[in-house]
Amino acid sequence: MSRNPKRGNTAVTVLLTVLILLMIAATALVIWLCIDLVNTQTDATVPSSNAVTLPSETIPSPTQTQPPETTLPEPEPEHVVSTATISAQGDLLMHKPVFDTCRKSDGSYDFESIFRYMKEYSAAYDYAVVNLETTFGGDGYPYQGNPTFNCPDPFADSIVDAGYDMLLTANNHCSDTTSSGIKRTLDLVREKGLATLGTQLNDEEPKYSVVDVNGIKIGMLCYTYATGVTSDGRPSLNGLSPVSEVGLVNYFMENNLSKFYSEVEEHLANMKEEGAEATILYIHWGIEYQLQENATQRTIAQNLCDLGIDVIVGGHPHVVEPVALLESTVDPGHKTVCIYSLGNAVSNQRTGISSLFPTGYTEDGALFSVTFEKYSDGSVYVAGADVLPTWVNMHSNNGSKEYNILPLDIERESEWTQMFDLTDANFSAAQKSYTRTMGIVGEGLEECRTYLEQAKADREAYYYDLAYHPENYASEITEATIETTAATDAAA
């Protein structure tokens, strides 16, 4: 019996076809399962729109934080933070006829009439200074004027009431009631609340003052000329016997000015250590009744300027002398305002009394004022100077004689007659006094004002430029930093 080969081949072919189809189907199933699994997992990670999210599970969407906008403040130039105006008035030259008019029927004294019209002005300054050309020696000495002055104590009360703050007590008459009078005068006026300058109770007291006026510390000195000196340094004043103790009076000798300059230099250093930011020196000098300063005054003034004194205020000639602007020979950037003499504040030196007073200049005085300004960087400058002429009106008031110091404020000239109760003749005399004084001080005063105004304008322009254009001063700032560092290192 035989087999059919064709039939056997057909079965094999069918079987292979079926296997291939199964493999294709299986592969397709695997692929579908993989795709379905991926879709299922993706759907599980996306919450449906109906899902509830707890507050603690809230995750804010990230946002980009913008830095806050910052505006830099405008630079502020250095500026004035404090001002102090100091006034100075001439000699309270208390002749006996002057204080006799202030004596009442019961024998007591009231000096109000002298300052009646002056008080409004003297009390208005930040710090008012006046020269006491007499002593309070007490009842142990006669109450009199020249040649040895001694005044009743109540005069001190009137000085306080008139608004003055300090008395200059170093002058050629301060020892007229001997050394005991020097000390008693100091005790009395200090007890009344007045500061003193130029004389001391002993050699241990400071010979200067550093006065704080509106936050500006001003160093002050007061000196008088002496007519002789002992080997141990006790001065003779006005040709009288020498003062009994060393150190009671600040004095200088014209034949030994180098000693004077050395003392001033030492006092300046001490005052600066105590914080003085500006300086005034009051000085009793010159020649009586001369309307122009002499060569010695000019020499002394220039040397004081060279030492760095800011303001010089002179007295003693009993007449007003010029104002001047001095320039240092060692520091061209430093200038000093100087008035050589303030004249008399009050006296009996009147026209017709003596051949020494023929023209009325001894009836005239100057209330001199100087203004200091302090800037926000701590610097202090002299910013202004002024002169208010004064005149002593001696007149009869209801049958009694009075001596009134009249402030000749030219802006109120039309009010003088009514303000001061003047006759036509006295009004005319007051006008002439004003003209005399301004004729002496006017030119120098204008020079000082012009300079001080320009210096202030330049100073503030510099401060403005420094604030808004600091790059213009880079080298200056660097040098200042180096100097400060060097100073700090040296101190360390």
Image (tube, rainbow, N blue to C red):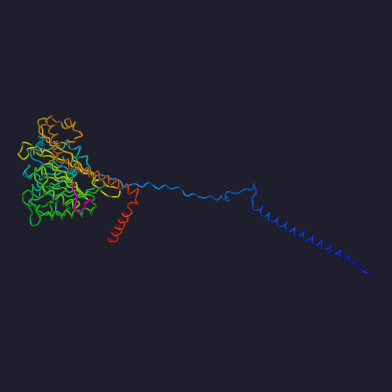
Residue 9 against residue 136 in the figure, above or below: below
Q: Residue furthest right?
A: 1
Asked if residue 215 is among those painted magenta in the image, a careful observer would answer no
The image quadrant of residue 128 is top left
Q: Please identify the dominant SS of the magenta region.
A: loop
Compare residues 407 and 191 and report the one nearer the observer.
407
Position of the N terminus by quadrant: bottom right
The image quadrant of residue 330 is bottom left
Residue 115 against residue 200 in the figure, above or below: above
Tell me if 315 is positioned left or right of 56 in this view.
left
Observer able to see residue 161: no
Asked if residue 330 is among those painted magenta in the image, a careful observer would answer yes
In the rendering, at what x and y percent does residue 278 appear? 22, 49
The image quadrant of residue 11 is bottom right
Q: Residue furthest bottom?
A: 1
In the rendering, at what x and y percent does residue 303 appear? 16, 52
In the rendering, at what x and y percent does residue 381 appear? 24, 47
Observer able to see residue 489: yes
Q: Residue furthest left?
A: 355
**Exactly how many numbered labels are in the figure?**
0
Tell me if 360 is positioned left or right of 368 in this view.
left
In the rendering, at what x and y percent does residue 347 appear? 10, 39
Q: Which residues are magenta?
A: 325-333
Compare residues 5 and 113 and report the one nearer the observer.
5
